[in-house]
Image (spheres, rainbow, N blue to C red):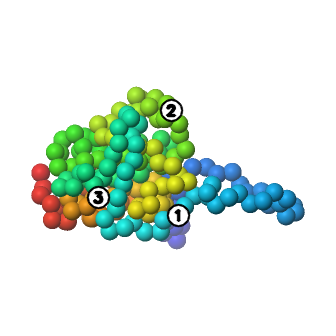
Amino acid sequence: MIKKFVPVALLALALAACKPEQAPLAVPAAAPETPAAPEATQPSVVQQTVEVPQLQVPTVDGKSYDLASHRGQWVVVNFWATWCAPCLQEMPELSALHAMRSNVEVVGLAYEDIELDEMQAFLKEHPVAYPIAIIDTFSPPKDFATPRGLPMTYLIGPDGKVARQFLGPVNAQEIEQAIVAAGGKAI
């Protein structure tokens, strides 16, 4: 009977692996005397990714990334964080995919509260061939669903439509298979 619960427990641990630790919430003894924080400081939550998402973000190298300018290519949009071990494990393979395939573009969206200089230092230790943008967790891209876990990856087709969504780590082979399944050519 215990052997049946081990896979379930391992799955639960794996899914919880890429969530930052949060301090327990304290229950106030009395009603707070200060007014509630303004809504602008509350994170916005998007429930569903739109069919043809738009994305325009500044990258850590000082350039700008516009998803629409990559029509005609397959684009891998990867939400990740520096503290997420599975995210770090998939970065070299995503980088190789980006570098080796002329019709596949990868963009990394760092979904965390990190300063630009900290990210630039991190990327010196963990270099990638694709552009990286830091995403404001309080105002994430409105056309993409708020990540329920990391990594969260979207495969966008040459027509700009979402072809596939991956929750959890993904490798180049899975992306290649998704491209073929969506009507693209195999390498």
Return the disc, 3 or 2, that comes first in the chain's sequence.
2
Name the residue at 12% across, 51% down: 187
Name the residue at 48% across, 65% down: 46
Q: In the displayed structure, would residue 103 be above or below residue 120?
A: below
Amino acid beneath label 3: Leu
Question: Residue at label 1?
Answer: 45
Residue 85 coordinates in the image, percent (x, y)? 46, 44
Q: In the displayed structure, would residue 63 be above or below residue 19?
A: above
On the image, which quarter does residue 158 sit in?
bottom left
Residue 83 coordinates in the image, percent (x, y)? 51, 43
Return the disc, 1 or 3, that comes first in the chain's sequence.
1
Does the image show residue 68? Answer: yes
Residue 140 coordinates in the image, percent (x, y)? 48, 55
Q: Label 2's element? A: helix
Disc 1 versus disc 3: distance between alpha carbons?
Answer: 21 Å
Amino acid beneath label 2: Glu
Give neighbour class at mark 1: few <14, some 14-19, many 20+ (Cα, 10 Å): some
Return the disc, 1 or 2, that comes first in the chain's sequence.
1
Which residue lies most toward the right here? 30
Q: Label 1's element? A: loop
Question: Residue at label 2?
Answer: 118
Disc 1 versus disc 2: distance between alpha carbons?
Answer: 26 Å
Name the residue at 39% across, 66% down: 49
Question: Residue at label 3?
Answer: 155
Amino acid beneath label 1: Val
Residue 108 horizontal side relative to residue 160, left or right:
right
Name the one closer to the observer, 28 or 142: 142
How many numbered dots are placed on residues in this image? 3
